[in-house]
Amino acid sequence: MLIEWPKREPEPTKYWLSTLSAETKIRDLVRMAKHRWIIERDYEELKQELGLGHFEGRGWRGFHHHATLCIAAYGFLVAERSRFSPSARAGQLELSSPEAPQDFRPRGAAGPHGATSSLVHRHAAHDDRPDFAAAA
């Protein structure tokens, strides 16, 4: 039996029963007991963030495919998170993006006179119409 009794608590807070051998080191026993929390957190993230809990099919094969894709997405997410330092993941480090050119204007943005263009420019992100305010 493993018992967790924090120093400031009047009595133990958690208990674990173990079937491991008596030769198991206490450090390994504690690691195994605490590892459950990591598994539960990962499972909750799979259900809430990646859609594992959204399966509404009826067959094992469909559920297996759905679960496999969710777990693959989670593996990708973990791999992407590991690319950055913990301070970057916590929002303490700001990641920069390349500067946009000065003449850049996103498609659908207001023209120089504040009105959006009703014309669709397939290849150009700037306004090709003449400047009527300058001509008036």
Image (spheres, helix red, strand yellow):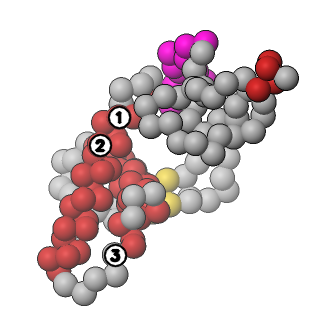
Q: How far apart are labels 3 and 1 at the CA level? A: 25 Å
The residue labelled by disc 1 is 80
In the image, is 96 to the left or to the right of 112?
Answer: left
Q: In which quarter of the image is residue 50?
A: bottom left
Which sits earlier in the primary sequence, circle 2 or circle 3?
3
Q: In the displayed orientation, state which residue is furthest to the front.
A: 136
The residue carrying mark 3 is: 55
Residue 132 appears in view:
yes
Cβ atoms at labels 1 and 2 below 8 Å apart? yes
- The local secondary structure at tag 3 comes to loop
Element assignment for label 2:
helix
The disc at residue 76 is: 2
- Residue pictured at 49% horizontal, 53% vertical: 4
| Residue situated furthest bottom in the rendering | 58
**Which numbered disc covers residue 101?**
none
Taking the spot 14% from the left edge, 77% from the top edge, the residue there is 61
Name the amino acid type tagged 1. Glu
Residue 43 drawn at (x, y percent): 38, 60
Q: Nearer the viewer, residue 42 or 1?
A: 42
The three-letter code of the residue at mark 3 reads Phe
Range of the magenta residues?
87-102
